[in-house]
Amino acid sequence: VPHGRAAAADAGEVRRVSGSMQHFQKPENALRRADELYAVGQKDPALVALHDVLSSKRHRTWQPMMEEVMKRFLTICVEMRRGKAAKDGLVQYRIICQQVNVASMEVVLRHFMGLAEEGAQAALDLAEKTISDKVESLLDFEDLEAEETPESLMMATIGGSADSKKRTDRQVVTPALKFLWEAYRSVLDVLRNNVKLEDLYRDTTSRAFGFCHQYKRSVEFRRLCEILRNHITAQTKYDPKWKDREPPTPESLQMHLETRFAQLSTAIEMELWQEAYRTVEDVHSLLQLMKKPPKPVSVAAYHENLAKVFWVADNKLFHAYAVARTFNTSLSFKTPLSAEAQELLASRALLAALSIAPASPVLDLNLLEYDLEHEKTKRMAQMLGFPTAASRSVLLNEAHRSGMLAKASPMVRELHALVERANVPLDLAVAVAPILTSIKAVPALAQYETALRRLVALRMLQQMERLYLTISIAKAAAAIPLLSWPELEALIVWATKKELLSLRVDYKHGRLNQPANKVDAAASSEVRESLANFAIALDAVSERLHAAELAKRKAATRARLYASIAATAEEEHQAVLSRRVVIERRKEEAERVQQEEGKEKMRMRALKQAEEEAEEKARLHADATRRDAERDQREREQEEAAQRRKLAEQMAEQRKALKVTKKKGGEGGKVETDVDKLAEKDRNELMREQRELLMDERVEFERRLEAMAKRHDHLERARREEERELLELRWSAQQAEDKRHHEEHAASLAQQMKETRAHDVEEKKRFSRMVQAAEAFTARVTAVRRAAHQEVVAAWREQQKARREEIRAERERVAAEEKAREEAIDRARREAEEEEALRIQEEMEAMRKKTEAEEERKRVQERQRQREKELEEKAALERLAQREQIGKSWAADDDDELPALEMAKAFGGPAAVAAAAAAAAPPPAANLAAAAAPAAPANRSVFDSPGNLGGAPPPARGGGTCGGAGGDAAAVLGHFKRTMELQEMLTKGEHEAAFATVLQAQSLDLLTWLCTKIDPSALLSPRHAPPPSQIVLASLAQQLAYDLSKETGLKLRWLQAVLPVIRPTDPLIKPNLGRVLEHVAASLQSCTEVLGNAGHPSHASLLAVSAVVSQLQAAIR
C-alpha cells in the first residue's frame, strides 16, 4: 500500500478483519496458525488470525499466551507498517489486561516502541548506505503527516539522478519515521488518564521528545505538545457525564509537571521559542492545580530554562529573576551544592541583575506605551510567581537581603560596589576593565559582559552630566574606552529616550551639551540638598545644647497628661457602662433575630419536606411510566420476533432454491437454512445476509455468462483464422476485376467528353450572328423604363410634402387644446385648495376649543386625585408611625405591608409610600395606576408609572382626550400631540416616562407605535441605566398580551424580552403579579390554535413566552 494512503488502507483492513471473523478455541492455536502463514509469506492472513483472538469475546480473560499473541501481532504490524491496526490491537489488549495484569500491558507497549525505533533506525541506515549521505541530510522534509500529491509523485517519477535523495526519503525514510511517530501517538493515546501506567507515560513522552529533537521534527513536536495539553485538560476539567471520576492525584500532577519541564528543555534545544512560552503557561496551570510544592531540583532546572528563554527574548528583567530563583531554590537542595557552584550561581544572578537596564526615576503613568508595558510585565510576573512590582532596584535589594551578594565572587562584589555607588569616579572604566576581562573569561558569566560595559558607560555619562555643562566628544570617548564612539552614541540616544540622560550631541562644535532648563534644575537641586543636610546637622547640635530644657518640658507634659487622665476616668467609666447597656440590647436583638431565623428555618424545612414528598410522588409516577414502557417494549419485541420468524421462513425457502446455496454447501461452507436459527438473528443482519446471497447468485450467473462469452469468442477466433486465406484470395480477384472496370469506364468517359466539346463549339459559331440585335433591343427597353421610374418618384415626393403639412397642423391644434385643459385644471385646483384651507382652519378652531375644555376637565380631576393620594399617603405614614411606636417586628407578621412601605420610603418619599401602601393592600379589580401613581409630570420616579397593573384590560383604541364623541379630527389631533410628546421623550432618553405616559393613556395603538420605536434588547440590557421599574414592566406585559391577534410578532418579541426581567419577589408587584400572569397565559392560550402550528413564524416565540410565564407562576406559588 502506498504510504500516502496508509490511513485508508488500515481502516479497510480493520473492516476486513471484523467482517471475516475466525474462531480459535485457544490462543495457542491462533499463534501457531499465524506462524505458519507468516512462514510462507502470507502476512495479511496471519494478522487477521491474531486480531480475531484479540477481539474475540471468549478470550477476554488474560493469560500468559495472550502476551505472546500480542507481541507477534505487533511485530507483524511493524513489519507491514500498519499503524491503525496496531493501535486497534493495543486498545483490545488494554481491555483484556487492564483489571488483571497491567504489567503485561507495559511490557507489550515497550516491546512495540522498541520494534518501531529499531525499524526507523534500520531505514535510516539503509538510506544512508544507499545514497552515501549523512542522516541529517535525509531529514529535510517538513511534515510526516503530509499527503503525497499527484504532482509530487509525477515529478518524482520523471526526475533524474538529482531526485534520488527525495525518492529515498519517500520510499524508505519517510514511512519509517512516520510509523515511529504514529507508534508514539498510539501509545500516548492508550496510556492517557491511566494512573497505573504513569511511569510508562512519562517514559513515552521522553522518547517522543528525543525523537523530535534527534530528527529535527518541529511540526511533530508542536503536535506532541498539543496532544499532551489536551490530555491534561481532559483529565482536569469537570464533565457532568463523569461525576464519579476522581481528580488527578498529586503524584500524577507531579509526573505531568516533570513532563512539562522536559518539554521546555526540548523546546529550548530545538529553538522553538513560541512553543517554549506556551509550555511555560502549561507549567503555570499545573502549579495552580498542585497542592504541594514540586521538587526543588525540578524547580531549579525549570527556572534555568526560563532564564534561557527570557535571555533569547531580550527580557533581562525576568531573566535576572529566573536566575535569582534558581539560586534561591538551590539553597533548599537535600544535597547542597559545593561552595564553588554556589559562588558561581550567586555571581551569575548578581550580574544578571546588574545587566538590567536602569529605569527612569520619573515616569508618566498616563503614557499608553508605559501602561501597556507595565500591564504586560505585571501579568507575566503573576504567571511566573515573580513579584508584581518587579524592577531592578527591588531585585538588587532582594540580593542584599537573601545573602546573594555575600556569596558572590569578590570581583563581582567589587563590580557591584563600583557601579551602584551614588557618585562614580570618572576613571570607573579603567577600574572595571580588569573585572570585565575576568568575567569574560568565565563561560557561565561571559554573556553579561556586553550589558555590563553599557552599564558602566551609562554611569560615567550620568556622572559627567552632573559635573560638566559641556564636554568634548573626544574627551568623553577617551574617558570611556569600553565602547566605541558609534556604540556610545547609540547608548546616549537610548538613555535620552528613557530619560536617563539629557545630553545633546553637537557635532558642529564636537561636544556634548545639556539643555539650559536642565542645568538650572540640577543647580537648584544641589543647593536644596546641601541646605537640607545643613539643617539636619543644626537640629542635632540644638538637641545636644538644650538637652536639660527638653527633658524638663517632657516631664511637665507627662504630668499634665496624667492629671487629665484622672479627671476623665469617671466619664470613661460611664461611657463603658452605657456601652455595656447598648451591647446587651444588641444581644437581645440578636437573640430575637436568631429566633426568627429558627422559625424561618423550620418553615423552610417544612417546605423542603413537602418538595421531597412531591419528588417521591413524581418518582413513583416515573417508575409506573417506566414499567408501562417496558411492557410496551416487550410486546413490541414479541411482535418483532414473530415478524422475524415469518421473514426467516420466507428467506429459508428462497435460499433452498438458490444455486449458490448448493455450491457453498458442497465446498464445505455453510449457508444457514434452518428457520429457528435464522429467526434468532436481527432483521438487518438477515436482510444483509440475504442481499449477500443474492449478490453471490448474481455473481455466479455473471460468471457463467462470462464463460459462455469466452467460449463463443474462442470459436469465433478459430473460424476467422480459417477463413482468413480464403478472404485474401477473394480480395485479390476483386481487385483485378475492379481495375479492369475502371479502365473501361475511363476510356468511354474520355470519348464522350471529346464529342461534347465539338458540339458546343459549333453552337457558339451559330449564335454569334445575333449579338448586335440583342444589345440594341436591351437599350430601348432600359430607356423607356427609366423615364417611367422618374415620373413615379416625382409624384411620390409631392404626396409626402402634403402629408407633412397635414401632420404639422394637427400637432399645433392638439397642443393648443392641451394647454387650455391644463389651465382649467389649475384654476379648479386652486379653488379647491382655498376651500379646503378654509375648512381646516374652521375645524382646528373648533378642535382647539374642545381641547381646552377637555384639559380643564382633566385638571379638575387631577386635583381631586392628588387630594385623594395625599390622604392615602398620610394614612400610610400614620400606620408606619404606629408600627414604629409599637416596636413590633414586621418579619413575624403574616402581611408584608411594612417592608414595602420601608422600601418605598427609602426610594421615593411620600408618593412612593402611598404607592407601596396601595400595593400592600388588596387592590380592587380596577386600574392600579390610580392607586400607585399620581398624575405627575414627565420626570416622574420609577414608582409613579405602574400602568394598568392587575385591573381591567385597556381599550383597543383611543384614550384620554381622543375618546368620546369629539369627532375624528379631535382624535387625530390628540393622537398626533401625544405622538410628538413621546418622540421628544425618546430623543431625550426618557424611556420610562414614555412608557408611563402610554400605559396611563391605555391606548394599544400608542403602545404598539412606541414598541416599534425602541429595541427591547437594548432597553432591558444590564448596560441600560436606569432600568425600567418592575411596575412598568408588569403593566407593559399585561397590555401587550391584551390582543395578540394584531402585531403578533412585535408583541411576542417584547413579551419574550420583558417577562424574564420581572422579579416575582418585588413587594410592589407581588400582590397583583399572579392575576397579570393569568391574563397573559389566557391570551397565549387563545392564540394557540393559530400560532401552535410548527410552521408559523411566531411559533418559537409563543413557546418561549409560555415557558417564561410558567416559570414565573411556579416562582409565585
Image: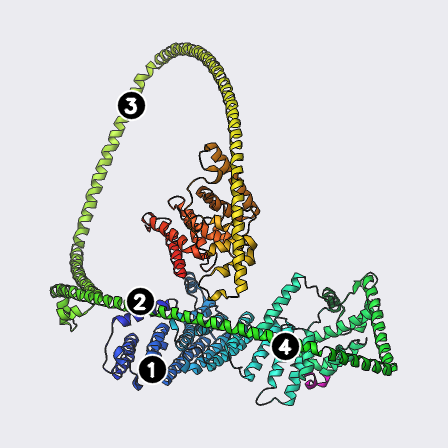
On whether residue 791 falls in the magenta region, the answer is no
What residue is pinned by disc 2? Answer: 618
Observer able to see residue 237: no
Please say if the residues under marks 4 and 3 sit with CB atoms less than 8 Å apart: no
Q: Does the residue at mark 2 contact the one at mark 3 (Cβ under 8 Å)?
A: no
Q: Nearer the viewer, residue 1080 or 952?
A: 952
The reply to whether the C-beta atoms of the residues labelled 2 and 4 are less than 8 Å apart is: no
Q: Which corner quadrant of the image does residue 633 belong to?
A: bottom left
First of labels 4, 3 by sequence position = 4
Q: CA distance from mark 2 to mark 4?
A: 60 Å
> For mark 4, does the 10 Å Cα neighbourhood hold few (<14), some (14 to 19), or many (20 or more) residues?
few
Residue 353, position as x, y percentages in the image:
68, 77
The dot on residue 760 is 3
Q: Quadrant of the N terminus?
A: bottom left
Looking at the image, is mark 1 or mark 4 earlier in the sequence? 1
- Count how many numbered circles sit on residues in the image: 4
- Disc 1 to disc 2, how far (Cα)? 43 Å
Q: Position of residue 102 (x, y in %)?
A: 37, 84
| Residues rendered magenta in the picture | 404-411
Residue beneath disc 4 = 577
Q: Residues within 10 Å of mark 3 (few under 14, many from 20)?
A: few
Secondary structure character of the magenta stretch overall: helix
The quadrant where residue 686 appears: bottom left
Query: Compared to 506, does 995 lie above or below?
Result: above
Nearer to me, 949 or 402? 949
Q: Secondary structure at mark 1?
A: helix
Spatial CA span between label 1 and label 3: 114 Å
Judged by depth in the image, the label closer to the viewer, 1 or 3, is 1
Q: Does label 1 or label 3 sit earlier along the sequence?
A: 1
Disc 2 crowd rating (10 Å Cα; few below 14, some 14-19, many 20+) is few
Q: Amino acid at mark 2?
A: Ala
The residue depicted at 84 percent of the width and 67 percent of the height is 523
